[in-house]
Amino acid sequence: MYKKVFLILILFSLLGTACSSTEKEEPIELTVSAASSLSSVLEEINVAFTNQHPNIKISLNLASSGKLVQQIEQGAPIDVFLSANQSYMDQIADRGMIITGSRVNFASNRLVLIVNKDQNPSLTTFQNFDYASVSNLAIGEPNSVPAGKYAKELLEKLNLWEENKDKLVFGKDVRQVLTYVESGNVEAGIVYYSDSLISSKVAISAIAEEGWHQPIIYPAAIIAASKKINAAELFIDFLISEEGKLIFAKYGLN
Amino acid sequence: MFPPSLDPLFLSLKVAGIATAIVFILGILSARLLNKKDFFGKGVLEAFFLLPLVLPPTVVGFGLLILFGKNGFIGRYLLEWFDLQIIFTWVAAVFAAVVVSFPLMYQNAAAAFQTIDERLEQVALTLGSSKWRVFRTISLPLAWPGLLSGLILTFARALGEFGATLMIAGFIPGKTDTIPLTIYFAVEAGNTEKASFWVIFIVTIGFSATFWLNWWSKRNVLRFAKKQES
């Protein structure tokens, strides 16, 4: 008899907890796919955004833009896409996978040539750098990493591609290129200016001029299949707001 | 795209072939030695041998990078004294393949040698056979089924090795683009044609190698085993 009463009490308390949890407001989880060059700045953006909108939680999916586009095309449940390159965004826009009105440019970047600080480098130019002194040059894989594609454009424009292409080591994203140079495993690499700021173990040897490659502009857009369009709009609005712009500038992504 | 560069094929076969040969010999030797001797810390050593099997390949790659990278514990001396750089070369790919497939060969060889009736070896010794001859004519043939399975697994693992290879050999088309790496980057770049091409290729290689090894073994080695039973 007491056993039955006990069991019924447990059952009701369980139901009670189930009911009470639905009374609270469910946080909205927004899945944002972003190019890996944005990983550091997005950490800060994330914190600032959540301060303004406490009920929206951002889930970051970081990889090279090429890989992210693959995932989106295969139907991954992404809400917002932040690409390091316009053509990857164009690719999914042409397939009608984004909400066209939501597409906006939110950041830009520059390419730099970095070397490990231990090499005691001095600032020079891409043309004058002594490529013969390095056994390897790391860049992102040109077909899937925007930083690699820009780097290839730059090297071809300066007629440096042919003579150096046997030394090239391809990274699967720009952060891997940074790590290669940081760890001293590759003597020089081409990364974004914003990446060079993050690491204290690398130094800039040269800064690229804008005409040498496609302009490095980051577009953002809401994925058409997203079920959280309002939250996504709020996020993208934050990226281009005054506060957002300040954060991007801090990381060299003005 | 067609005909595509067949570099990955030759590289993968070279790397997997050399790695398999190295692991086959090393695995048999270490399994044999540890089978015969008992010493303090043997269990720890065996667990260490099997470690790469339990760890994610990227962790194995990371460890190898720390050892053989330019600032690595071994790597920096190789560079200073011999001007030898292992990372970002096909040799690094062989290293990676050897480390990840060694546990497979060792485990199979150890189990195989365990099952041999020691008395048969001892009888041969008393009849005047040298240790090496006993090993060659009695232990090896008796252990063969286990050794063969180790060989097949080793080749398959070495052929398909990706994570550790990417870390220490990197992706350098023409130098370290093994088939698994080529497939990965083809998928990343959205080049599904190229990816599918290599997937079919590697499946065919794996299938043929396994099939042929089993067939060859039945014909040349196991048929003696069958005779003994009758």
Image (tube, coloured by chain):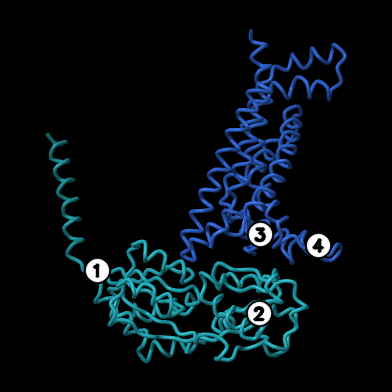
Chain colours: A cyan, B blue
* 10 Å crowding of disc 3: few (<14), some (14-19), many (20+): many
**What residue is drawn where x is 67% and y is 31%?**
B109
Q: CA distance from mark 4 to mark 2?
A: 24 Å
Q: Quadrant of residue B77?
A: bottom right
Q: Do pointers 4 and 3 mark residues of a single chain?
A: yes
* 10 Å crowding of disc 4: few (<14), some (14-19), many (20+): few
- Indicate which disc residue B84 carries: 4
Left or right of B85, for residue B222: left
Is disc 3 placed on a helix, strand or loop? Answer: loop
Q: How many marks?
A: 4
Residue type at mark 4 is Leu
The mark lying in front, picked from 4 and 2, is 4
Quadrant (top left, top right, bottom left, bottom right) of the N terminus of chain A? top left
Q: Position of residue B168 (x, y in %)?
A: 66, 60
Left or right of B144, for residue A198: left
- Name the chain letter of the residue that bears numbered label 1: A
The mark lying in front, picked from 2 and 3, is 3
Which residue has dot 2 on it? A202
Is disc 1 placed on a helix, strand or loop? Answer: loop
Is disc 2 placed on a helix, strand or loop? Answer: strand
Q: Closer to the camera, B39 or B26?
A: B26
Q: Position of residue A144 (x, y in %)?
A: 51, 69
Which residue has dot 3 on it? B176
- Name the chain letter of the residue that bears numbered label 4: B
